[in-house]
Amino acid sequence: MDFGLIAQYLANGILLGTMYALVAVGFTLFFGVLDVVKFSHGDVLMLGTFIGFTAWLGLEAIGVTNPWIQLLGILLCSLGATALIGAAIAKWLVLPLKKAPQLNTLLITLMLGTAIREVVRLFYPNGSNPKAFPALLPNSAIEIGNFSLRADSVILVLAGLGLIGLLNLVINRTRLGLAIRAVAQDEETARIMGINYTLVVLATFALGSGVAAFAGIMNGLYYNEINFGMGLILGLIGFSAAIVGGLGNLYGAILGGFLFAGLQTVGAALLPFASAYKDVFAFAVVIALMAWKPTGLIPERSSDRV
Amino acid sequence: MTDISLNPLDRPRPWLAGASVILASGLYVWALIVAEETWQVLGLLLLALVAVVIGLKTGLSRRVQQDWAQSEPRLNRLAFATLIVLILALSQAHFALLMVTTVLLYFVAAMGLNIQFGFAGMVNFAGAAFFGAGAYTAAVLGTIDAFPPLLTLVAGGLVALLLGIPLLVPIVRTTGHYAAVVTIAFGVLFRTFLEVNEILGGPQGLMVAPMRLFGWDFNNSPTIGGFEMSFYANYALFAAVLAALVFVLMRRLERSWIGLHMDAVRLDETAAACFGISVKRTKITAFLMGNLILGVSGALYGMMISFIAPASFTFSDSLLLVSIVLLGGMGSPWGAAVAATIVVLLPEKLQLLQEYRFLLFSILVMLVLLFRPDGLLPRQLRNFFATRRAVK
């Protein structure tokens, strides 16, 4: 295998890893504050991407053609709307079930995911067919041997990593982040300290969903195609990544995201007889990892209450 | 649920209310299956709603519950007889019997999942994968002429069980969401594997040989007294027997020490371990037994529809099975029966809504979870002294 091919796989893997990490971060944030898994995350992501796509159609219609302004509009609409949707889900579906068994929350959000998917498929104009997402980023490429580094993927990776860094700053350096961490550590004590619990939970869900919408836009810009089912597999992978990394830990999610992308890439590169098996390989390794580290690579610090 | 309930009530005819409900539901399901027009179906649904409300208001539901507690074996036998009569009454209609058989097999599969979800509290989001493992086993073994198809059912179950074995280590070691991801990953892995695997037919799938019993080919139409029945009647009757067997097994399991252990493990692992229950062994038993049942039902399902493809065993299908379990009420076999009927029959009858059925289901399950988190027919207390009579 030559250098060009390896570099190509590497670039692709890093892009995928950034995307997965962005999705996984949401799962881990939600789990941190509320100890729940919001399974509709992937479909909220898809919805966010479709909102972005609609915003682009709207901008085209009113005659805005500068790609950078379009991009800004897409991101603002998509991230804003998705953040609101995330908060709404938390308020009306997740918080009411706070006292119920974990399984119920898992299922209600799974069903919500299905509902969102079906709504987009049935009610979005021609929603059951894939949509061509516009290529708004410059598509020039640098050729090194037979390896071509596309400018758009560089921008996407940098933006994604920047967003992860920003999120890290928000969690670790701001008052909101402090409140989120406090709630994650101990809800009751946080309430006693005067933290508005509901508000913090809603803000966390808004934050996580917005980040996921960014991952969705990233996916659209890179593959130039979006469809109603894209959220399911991205959500599954993001969830697996968050779990493998260890729920409730931001670094775990990032590690898990890149690990999963790495596994897929290695699977595609090293299984030359059938690269179609790359997902089989990646998920099999996930199962094996769970057997080895039942609470993830960076386990949450917890003890059983007896 | 884990208490012992004593029921020393002595009422006249402590089976009348239960028996009438069984007969009424049998008649209702028959009417629903025969109904052709959308307005008829909608009318029947409205009728069901009104009946349920009346039953709850007049205290009839409590009487039915008491009847069940007091004379369960008799009522169960009556329910089985009603089912057989229903199948015979529909014996001319291909499609109706196909639906009845599908309901029954989903019911069996849901009972398998119930052992995992409802008894032992283990999550399994790969139900369709184990169901599919049974169906694929039936397809592969069906190509061998000498292989007795009755054993194929057993083999389907065993293959599903064996497939679950590599998952045991991660499943037993993890809990909650971590266990969920293991089964989800397995479900996706299984489906992807089938799609890319050329030997098992790839995305196109495989043909499945029909069931044969004592030389009787199930694809022949049985003729009794000059009446020719649909060949699906074979499968429907066989599935009814299978459902009855699994139902009995589940009830027995619930009343046994194994069932008690499973409940203890579900409610509190630490406490269960303190009382000397082997959490590991209990979980392994529940997981393998559930998968075995899933596999058996999958094998019969494959033989009945005679053609299987990976697209029928996706994550969404696993979710459908899980929603049957949840809709009916965790650990409640009767609940699973009602939920399986709703989940399979409704979309088929409301062709108008066919396109919207997944949307409707997801909303229905969400509403149930929000407003009736225990399911439609929640699991009842264990009744160890059902036949106890007050001494006169």
Image: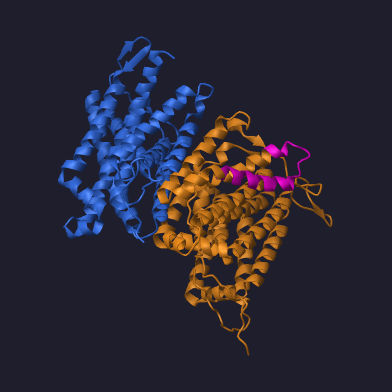
Chain colours: A blue, B orange
- For image coordinates 22% across by 55% down, the residue present is A197
Q: Is residue B314 visible?
A: yes
Instruction: Identify the residue shown where x is 54% and y is 42%.
Output: B166
Q: Is residue B142 magenta?
A: yes
Query: Could you say which is closer to the camera, residue B169 or residue A42?
Result: B169
Left or right side of B139 for B66: left
The relative height of residue B389 versus residue B77 in the rendered view (above or below) is: below
Percent x, y of residue B272: 46, 62
Q: Residue at x 45, y 50 (%)?
A: B362
Q: Tell me: B355 left or right of A78.
A: right
In the picture, measured across the screen, residue A37 lies left or right of residue B254, that is left
Please name whichever residue, B306 or B250, is drawn nearer the observer in this view of the structure. Answer: B250
Quadrant for the C terminus of chain B in the image: bottom right
In the rendered image of this protein, does residue B142 appear above or below residue B249?
above
Where does residue A36 sit, x and y in percent of width and height?
A: 35, 51
Q: Is residue B119 magenta?
A: no
Quadrant position of residue A74: top left
Asked if A251 appears above or below B224 in the picture, the reply is above
Image position, residue A137 (x, y; %): 28, 22
**Residue A133 visible somewhere in the drawing:** no
* Residues drawn in magenta: B140-164
Could you tell me which residue is drawn at 81 percent across and 49 percent down?
B214
> In this rendering, would B168 be left or right of A39?
right
Majority SS type along the magenta span: helix
Residue A229 image offset from top left, x and y in percent: 43, 37
The residue nearer to you, when weighing B374 against B126, is B126
